[in-house]
Image (cartoon, grey):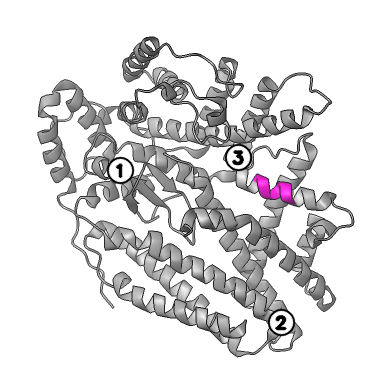
């Protein structure tokens, strides 16, 4: 085993040496600087782990071989992760990335707990890997939507996942209380004590665990709304609505362990929240979804995963979660019509202007968006990292 | 929007904990082999702190699961909850095989902070069993994040 481990660590050292020139070159634009700085630390830490493995192997101490085997496995994962995920944002960087990077960076700096966390994203579906370290949080976003303004607000939802990680103990406690209410309401009052009891218990377990994920998604929606106001509601309604039955109804097999509540339920929850904030967007969005539901004659069946009687508990939990985390709330002037876009315009004002423009004069929108993006990105600093 | 957030967190958690296990295990074994003096590096102190914090969280999840009639851990992410259920299952086995079933979480935490050389052997067994559990459990997350051929 010793020789195998020496060879594998030698290979890892070679991999890291090959990767170094990519990381120690200036990033193509300043918005990637903090990410590249973090990558250099990650590279240094991984190189140190590999060096230590080789030093320990040189001791000839058999008792620690399995520990080094495990540490080599960890180093292997770190190098693979670097190659698969972490290098992509700089190897495939495009000038159009600057829009998303500026949005993410602004979000991170909008909250004390995430200030200074590097901004980075890759192509893909709307998602985030909300890690705290040693892995950096990485967002992914669809290639077309990255280039426009209308869906930038969806980053606000993903940012909610990152906030959750930084406030996990407090938020898990609130989710625990909600899960208990879900369990009380959705579990049959009398449990059978026969061969079906096991199946019943397994189903109960699935519902409760599914609600852990649903609660976090609903919290992220609430964060998006508090941060982005009407623009977030329009963005999520437009992006998530696929105009299919699945927006309103899912089979029980699809609900089990599902990641998100049924989309119409999310829109309903968000719209009711938006109404309490006095946002007209709520009625506009709800009306659209009701028309669709009527036209599609969708069944109202949640297969025991939701009951309208849960709504007050959900609303109360989400309010408590948002209060606990305290995301920056949008300001009234950020949703008011705006004459011009400047580099210091907030992303909140930017995306709200975009939706207003899209609603008021859709025929001019693309041209306006192109100029707005250029005006917002203009004025960023030049790169100043030094290559090694 | 997908739930990769849960997998990514579980992947990171396993990496941090397994690395801490290895650091403390290597340190303890080299002490026994008299290849190290008694002083403890910052890395080892951090590894102890990381493991103590993790055992606190895992212990809470296991107790939480053991109290529920269907062994559900409320307020715990599903991946950690599955790990807690595996520990709860080990603790119900007789005769106890894993150190995780022989020791209470309080005893395990005491072992982690002990500087008594007589505890070293029990500590190493506990660390080995904890690492085995974590490596088995995290394989799904590793494949999900890094892929498979």
Does residue B40 show up?
A: no
Q: Do dots 3 and 2 share one subunit?
A: yes
Can you tell which quarter of the image residue B55 is in?
bottom right
Q: Residues within 10 Å of mark 2 (few under 14, many from 20)?
A: few
The disc placed on residue A63 is 2
Q: Residues within 10 Å of mark 3 (few under 14, many from 20)?
A: many
**Residue at point 39%, 34% (across, down):** A224
Please state the extent of the stretch shown in magenta in the rendering.
B81-86
**Residue at point 33%, 52% (across, down):** A122
Q: Do dots 2 and 1 share one subunit?
A: yes
**Residue at point 70%, 51% (across, down):** B58
Q: Which secondary structure, mark 2?
A: helix
Disc 1 vs disc 3: which is toward the camera?
1
Whether residue A169 is situated above or below residue A268 in the rendered picture: below
Magenta span dominant secondary structure: helix
How far from the left and from the top, in percent, is residue B107? 82, 60
Does residue A101 show up?
A: yes
Q: Are marks 1 and 3 in contact (CB under 8 Å)?
A: no
């Amino acid at each position: 085993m010793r020789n195998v481990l020496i060879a594998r660590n030698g290979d890892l050292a070679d991999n890291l040496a090959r990767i170094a020139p990519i990381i120690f070159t200036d990033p193509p634009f300043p918005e990637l600087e903090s990410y590249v700085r973090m990558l250099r630390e990650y590279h240094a830490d991984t190189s140190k782990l590999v060096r230590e493995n080789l030093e320990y192997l040189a001791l000839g101490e058999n008792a620690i071989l399995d520990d080094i085997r495990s540490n080599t496995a960890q180093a292997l994962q770190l190098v693979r992760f670097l190659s698969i995920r972490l290098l992509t944002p700089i190897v495939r960087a495009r000038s159009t990335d600057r829009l998303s990077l500026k949005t993410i960076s602004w979000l991170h700096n909008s909250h004390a707990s995430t200030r200074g966390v590097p901004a980075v994203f890759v192509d893909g579906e709307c998602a985030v890997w909300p890690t705290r370290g040693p892995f950096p949080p990485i967002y992914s976003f669809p290639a077309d939507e990255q280039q426009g303004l209308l869906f930038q607000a969806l980053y606000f939802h993903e940012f909610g996942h990152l906030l959750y990680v930084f406030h996990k103990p407090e938020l898990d406690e609130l989710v625990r209380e909600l899960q208990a209410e879900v369990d009380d309401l959705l579990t049959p009052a009398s449990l059978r004590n026969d061969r079906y009891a096991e199946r019943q218990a397994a189903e109960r377990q699935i519902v409760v665990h599914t609600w852990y994920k649903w609660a976090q998604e609903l919290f992220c929606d609430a964060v998006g709304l508090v941060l982005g106001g009407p623009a977030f509601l329009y963005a999520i309604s437009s992006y998530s609505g696929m105009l299919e039955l699945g927006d309103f109804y899912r089979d029980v097999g699809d609900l089990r362990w599902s990641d998100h509540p049924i989309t119409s339920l999310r829109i309903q929850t968000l719209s009711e929240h938006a109404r309490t904030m006095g946002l007209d967007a709520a009625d506009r969005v709800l009306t659209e979804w009701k028309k669709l539901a009527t036209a599609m004659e969708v069944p109202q069946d949640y297969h025991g995963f939701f009951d309208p009687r849960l709504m007050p508990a959900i609303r109360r939990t989400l309010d408590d979660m948002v209060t606990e985390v305290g995301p920056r709330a949008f300001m009234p002037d950020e949703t008011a019509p705006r004459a011009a876009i400047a580099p210091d315009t907030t992303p909140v004002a930017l995306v709200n202007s975009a939706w207003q423009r899209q609603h008021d004069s859709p025929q001019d929108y693309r041209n306006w968006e192109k100029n707005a993006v250029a005006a917002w990105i203009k004025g960023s600093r030049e790169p100043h990292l030094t290559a090694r | 929007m997908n739930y990769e957030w849960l997998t990514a967190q579980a992947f990171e958690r396993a990496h941090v904990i397994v690395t801490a296990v290895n650091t403390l295990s290597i340190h303890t074994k080299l002490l026994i082999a008299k290849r190290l003096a008694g002083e403890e590096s910052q890395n080892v102190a951090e590894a102890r702190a990381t493991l103590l914090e993790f055992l606190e969280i895992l212990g809470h999840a296991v107790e939480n699961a053991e109290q529920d009639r269907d062994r559900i851990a409320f307020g715990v992410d599903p991946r950690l909850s599955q790990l807690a259920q595996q520990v709860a299952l080990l603790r119900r086995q007789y005769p106890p095989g894993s150190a995780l079933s022989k020791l209470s979480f309080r005893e395990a935490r005491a072992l982690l902070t002990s500087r008594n050389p007589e505890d070293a052997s029990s500590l190493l067994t506990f660390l080995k069993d904890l690492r085995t559990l974590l490596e088995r459990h995290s394989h799904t997350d590793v494949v999900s994040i890094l892929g498979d051929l």
